[in-house]
Amino acid sequence: MALTIISLMKQVPIASQMRMGDDGLMDRTKAKSIINIDCQYALEAGLQMKNDNPDAKLIVCSMGPPSFEESLKKAISMGYDEAYLLSDRKLGGSDTYATGLAISTMLKHLGFGKGLDEDFIVIAGRQTSDGDTAHVPSQVAENLDVPQATFVEVASLNNNIIKAKRVIEGGYQIMSIPLPCVLSFTPTGVNPRRASLAGVVKAGNSKITIFGIDDINLSDQKIGLSGSPTIVAKVINIKSERAPIKMIDGRKEDELVTNLISSMKDGKNTLEVEKKKVVKAKKRPEDFAVVDFRDGASGILTWAEIVNGKISRPSLELLTPAKNLVKQLAEDTKIITVVIGKNLGNIPKELISYGADEVIVIDDDRLEEYIILPFASIFEQIIKKINPEIALFAATTPGRELAPRIGVKTNSGVTADCTALEIGEHIDRKKKTIFTPILESRRPTYGESKLATILGFTCPQISTARAGTFEVPAQDTKRKGKITSFEPKLIKEHFATKIIEKIVGKSGVDTLFTADIIVSGGRGSIGDNMKLIQDLAEALKKKGVNAEWAVSRPVVDEGLVEYARQVGQTGKSVRPKIYIAVGISGAIQHIAGMKESETIIAINHNAKEAIFKNADFGIVGKYEDILPELIERVNDGFTFGI
């Protein structure tokens, strides 16, 4: 049977045009929509595969309102053969779990799935700009019961084996994945092509096949707002807590730098502290039933990711919110950490010293490197055995693909990229019920302009935590805990995906988290391939300063710098004493990762860039002129007060 390449595509609203409705949730009805950027790269990846496999059929699928037809026709104009849209009012309000289920059910209806047509590849964008969860590709893969690879830059197909280059923290992997499979693509591959005139004519004459849920035999029990395992409880605006910037005056670069040094000695502007309004706690309705939905589930499960033989810092960070949640739950609530790898040695004891009450150890030579299928199966087996109420994962590349796959296995929703985790309660006035205790997972969304509170009603309640958001807990080497070995049942098919090669750059995963000064470059500083950015960081290091350099997402997306150095919503969150933003426009996605910095210095040639609204000191000028002068001052002993 001929190969079929299936591209999943989503149309997304422009974030700046979103408005908050009277119900406290987001209203996208008046916002213009475009094809999600990452999905555009996935569409191109499918076309590239067809170049090497000319007999392959290209189809594009989407889920959404009838207005999505416009984007589907654009895919046909690019070179796709067929388009399918799942559109039904009953799908409204679906979370990512319900979305993954609905899309995979449509694909099975079309004849694709394990045990059906085996000669197919599902490709998708890494994530969508309105949600940034990166959940759906993993959820579709689990529902179809096929292997996957996420965060893929480029992929080729030969002899029914995909060879893919996958971005990881600190570098990349070369992987082989057998058909059928699911791949999700980053926007760092081949740029999407423009539609040809012949393609536009073809699209105009094409008919989009539209399905309702009844057409694909999809029950409404696990879709839509009522069927989703998670709900958005509320959304609030995120307000800046930084005082107005001090703009530095000067005719030439030497004068600008001199005045910057003088201004920093005088101190930054301060924000007038507003009197906090006393918010009265909502009174519990006395006639409502109080329900503990956990059904016996207890304990907090975390994953200790092992990178180069060490516990990753984001995994240790998880223990901080876990310990805080324990204080809000029953006194006997335990933190149980799972660690998987080869020759783990003293790592379990180290995890106990940081706060784990029990460490479940899977020490297996085959599991030295993270591989999605065996790791997902191991967690499924452990969760079914110990029945935790909460499961926490770091929002690293592996964590962001592993958590949603586990969620499908356990029928649980997943909240991505959380910056706050608390125990609360949910009052359902329609059902006259109070659900408690429930995990309140808070995450920035809609381009970091809003903070959403997500609730899950199935256990484990699964969340991923943004790396760098929480501090690593203090270590107590005298602390006692339980270490348990676990023997999972693994089969040959779990190891179908293989890592051929792993390339890791000079920077480690954790260097940005501990730096006192970070020099960060954006699209406006790439003229010299980031040399001056690196030179300033290196000059500071030579003066004994704990300095590092980083970049914004556009620099990574253009393939100039490894993902490990990306700061922002989909990169790392950092909190250095000094953050120097060079040539960075100030997109809210980047601000999300650096806003906790003690002092922010912005250098940009365009005085109208948003970065100046989110910094303490600002210089308008060309980085090629300013940075050499700064480097010279550092060489003479200036270290920004560090």
Image (spheres, rainbow, N blue to C red):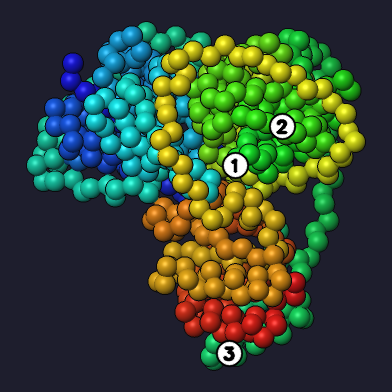
Depth check: give the residue in front, 503 or 59. Answer: 503
C-alpha distance separating marks 2 and 1: 13 Å
Question: In the rendered structure, which disc, 2 or 1, sits on the residue that comes first in sequence?
Answer: 1
Depth check: give the residue in front, 168 or 186. Answer: 168
Quick check: 107 above or below 533?
A: above
| Residue 58 seen in render | yes
Q: Quadrant of residue 541?
A: bottom right
Residue type of the residue flagged with mark 2? Gly
Q: Position of residue 89 (x, y in %)?
A: 42, 21
321 with respect to 154 (left or right): right
Q: Residue at x 42, y 72 (%)?
A: 528
User: Label 3, on which residue?
Assistant: 254
Depth check: give the residue in front, 348 or 552. Answer: 348
Disc 2 crowd, CA 10 A, few/some/many (<14, 14-19, 20+): few
Q: Which mark is residue 24?
A: none
Point out the image quarter for the C terminus: bottom right
Residue type of the residue flagged with mark 3? Asp
| Residue 613 seen in render | no
Q: Quadrant of residue 538?
A: bottom right
300 with respect to 448 (left or right): right
Q: Quadrant of residue 543?
A: bottom right
Question: In the rendered structure, which disc, 3 or 1, sits on the residue that comes first in sequence?
Answer: 3
Disc 3 crowd, CA 10 A, few/some/many (<14, 14-19, 20+): some
Residue type of the residue flagged with mark 1? Asn
Question: In the rendered structure, which disc, 3 or 2, sits on the residue that comes first in sequence?
Answer: 3
Q: Residue at x 72, y 41 (%)?
A: 317
User: Label 2, on which residue?
Assistant: 345
User: Label 1, on which residue?
Assistant: 308
Q: Residue at x 61, y 29 (%)?
A: 342
Point out the image quarter for the N terminus: top left
| Element on which disc 1 rests | loop
| Element on which disc 3 rests | helix
